[in-house]
Image: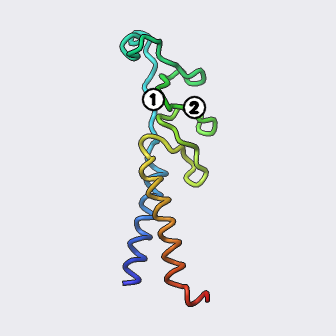
Amino acid sequence: MLGSTGAFLLVNLVYNYLMAICVDPGLPPAYDDGADAALEADGAAPRQCHKCSRLKPPRAHHCSVCKRCVLKMDHHCPWINNCVGFHNYRYFCLFLLYLAACCLFVVIAFWRAFW
């Protein structure tokens, strides 16, 4: 039981870590001058990134480390060497959850050895 629980946690930890690294965080669409009126419902012109000239929807930011705009950017994470954005946010959160679960599992499983 102890070994299968540890293996389950480890496999999920590694899987979500690799997916957070490998999945692209998301790229905003290219800026199209002809679609200005259709993009904004309130009549305002859509925003454009000054560094990469892409459309800048709400919560999209230009990452200074990756040198690109990221859709729904949360932050650039040095653990995964990638931005956490729209497409890999789920995997990053699950990675942190399984990391905490693995740490708790090690503390509980080896409590007597440490004590």
Q: Residue at x 63, y 39 (%)?
A: 65
Q: Residue at x 48, y 28 (%)?
A: 58
**Total marks in image:** 2
**Element type where label 2 sits in the image:** strand
Residue 100 x/y as whole percent: 51, 66
In this rendered view, identify the residue nearer to me: 53 or 114. Answer: 114
Vertical placement of residue 72 versus 12, above or below? above
Asked if residue 115 lies left or right of residue 69, the reply is right
Residue 92 x/y as whole percent: 47, 53
Vertical placement of residue 64 versus 39, above or below? below
- Residue under numbered circle 2: 62
Q: Dot 2: within a 10 Å radius of its alpha carbon, few (fewer than 14), some, or many (20 or more) residues?
A: some
Disc 1 residue type (three-letter): Pro
Pick the quarter of the image with the C terminus.
bottom right
- Residue under numbered circle 1: 28
Disc 2 residue type (three-letter): His
Residue 60 x/y as whole percent: 51, 31
Residue 66 x/y as whole percent: 59, 38
| Mark number displayed over residue 18 | none
- Quadrant for residue 107, please give it: bottom right
In this rendered view, identify the residue nearer to me: 35 or 81. Answer: 35
Q: Residue at x 47, y 69 (%)?
A: 101
Q: How is the image coloured?
A: rainbow
